[in-house]
Image (cartoon, rainbow, N blue to C red):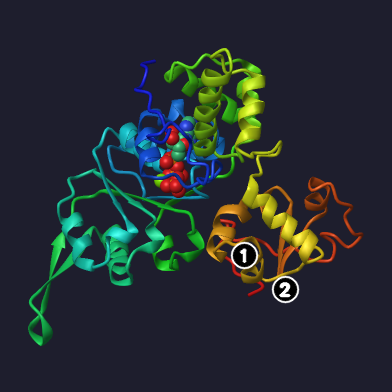
Amino acid sequence: MSRVEDETELNPDGSYDATARVVDPVGDEEERRFEVALRPKRLADFPGQPRVRDQLGLLLEAARRRQRPPDHVLLSGPPGLGKTSLAMIIAAELEQPIRITSGPAIQHAGDLAAILSSLAEGEVLFVDEIHRMARPAEEMLYLAMEDFRVDVVVGKGPGATAIPLELPPFTVVGATTRSGLLPAPLRDRFGFTGHLDFYSAFDLAQILTRNATLLGIDATHQGIAEIAGRSRGTPRIANRLLRRVRDYAQVHGSGVLDLDAARAALALFDVDQSGLDRLDRAVLEALCRRFGGGPVGLSTLAVAVGEEPDTVETVAEPYLVREGYLVRTPRGRAAAALAWTHLGLTAPPTAAGGAIPLPLDDDGVSGRFGD
Ligand SMILES: Nc1ncnc2c1ncn2[C@@H]1O[C@H](COP(=O)(O)OP(=O)(O)OP(=O)(O)O)[C@@H](O)[C@H]1O
Ligand SMILES: [Mg+2]
């Protein structure tokens, strides 16, 4: 394994940006550059997500044998679980170039027509945040996906004519954190949908061990296991905590990333035993202490913790729901018994039972209740 360039994340004056949320699953630009170096390159190097990996493996192998591009692939799931990594892996496994774009970058059908008409045979077109594409572009994309054809409009007004342009076969890989927002016709054009779920602590430990080696970090099993258990099932968070604990070990410890360094660093960054941070705990505190366990509407809850509703909904909530701290009900958010005990409070007998959880959308965040 080759060693990648290390990158420090200290401010110019040597301090940390304490306002940045260390367990934010959405990375910033700088972090994304750093991630490129740690991304697994092949399916065999990609730990976790066994179902999606096996299904993708089959799809790609069959395509290779037939010497035809595989079906279009949609990857859905919360931020930081490996959608972009898998898109790159798909192209690498097919030994094809990958063209990268994103929903927000395609605001006009013309933007997409330019990309589509320049694709080479077999090329992989990766559309990140595909749910954010403009509607006319969406329509153009699903026609292109089905018929490998795009209508290029020449001229304007009544004299405009559509000239059909044949496209060589290619593969679209779409990624979305909100698959519930994709229109059905577009979703149906994907022959394969892989839903990425939060990782087990075991899988995260594997990822961390590999990355510690890549970064030249001397780490003990216990140190790695402690980080893995507090990373909210998310590799991006695990990688970030790895760097923070590494810093701590270098500055305050022996340089070895061990259990003591992990515990002390995670306490410093307010990440508790269960991987919950200040925002998560603020949400639970507000729910239990101020609203008697709820149910309470999303916007009221967001005001109580001083955050945007969208932040509470997409950043804090999916994990709290998935781990059973919080339930979403037709009347709003409610604290489950686990939330009370986590805060050291006694759960009322009605906790979690007072609310009947509704099934979540598959991305865990797209339904809006209680507003
Ligand atoms: N299975 C995995 N094994 C090793 N590293 C992983 C794995 N999944 C994700 N990572 C790492 O986590 C980071 C984030 O992954 P990636 O960018 O693929 O997530 P994403 O799902 O595309 O996130 P977003 O929704 O924010 O775009 C990367 O550094 C990547 O290396
Ligand atoms: Mg991504």
Q: Earlier in the sequence, mark 2 or mark 1?
A: 1
Q: Position of residue 98 (x, y in %)?
A: 26, 41
Nearer the observer: mark 2 or 1; the answer is: 1
Amino acid type of the residue that numbered disc 1 sits on in the rendered structure: Ala
User: Crowding near pointer 1: few (<14 within 10 Å), some, many (20+)?
Assistant: some
Q: 313 or 154: which is nearer to us?
A: 313
* Residue 302, numbered label: 1
Q: Residue at x 49, y 28 (%)?
A: 243
> In the rendered view, does 100 fall on the left or right side of 237?
left
**Element class at badge 1:** helix
Marks 2/1: CA distance? 15 Å
Q: Does residue 59 appear anywhere in the picture?
A: no
Q: 268 or 180: which is nearer to us?
A: 268
> Mark 2 — residue?
331
> In the rendered view, does 269 fall on the left or right side of 93?
right
Q: Position of residue 269 (x, y in %)?
A: 60, 37
Amino acid type of the residue that numbered disc 2 sits on in the rendered structure: Arg
Q: Classify the position of the N terminus by image quarter.
A: top left
Q: Does residue 146 appear anywhere in the picture?
A: yes
Q: Position of residue 142 (x, y in %)?
A: 32, 63
Q: Classify the position of the C terminus by image quarter.
A: bottom right
Confirm if mark 2 falls within 8 A of ligand 1.
no
Q: 206 or 337: which is nearer to us?
A: 337
Q: Position of residue 294 (x, y in %)?
A: 77, 66
> In the rendered view, does 147 fall on the left or right side of 18?
left
Q: Residue at x 56, y 53 (%)?
A: 315
Residue 38, relative to residue 72: is it above or below?
above
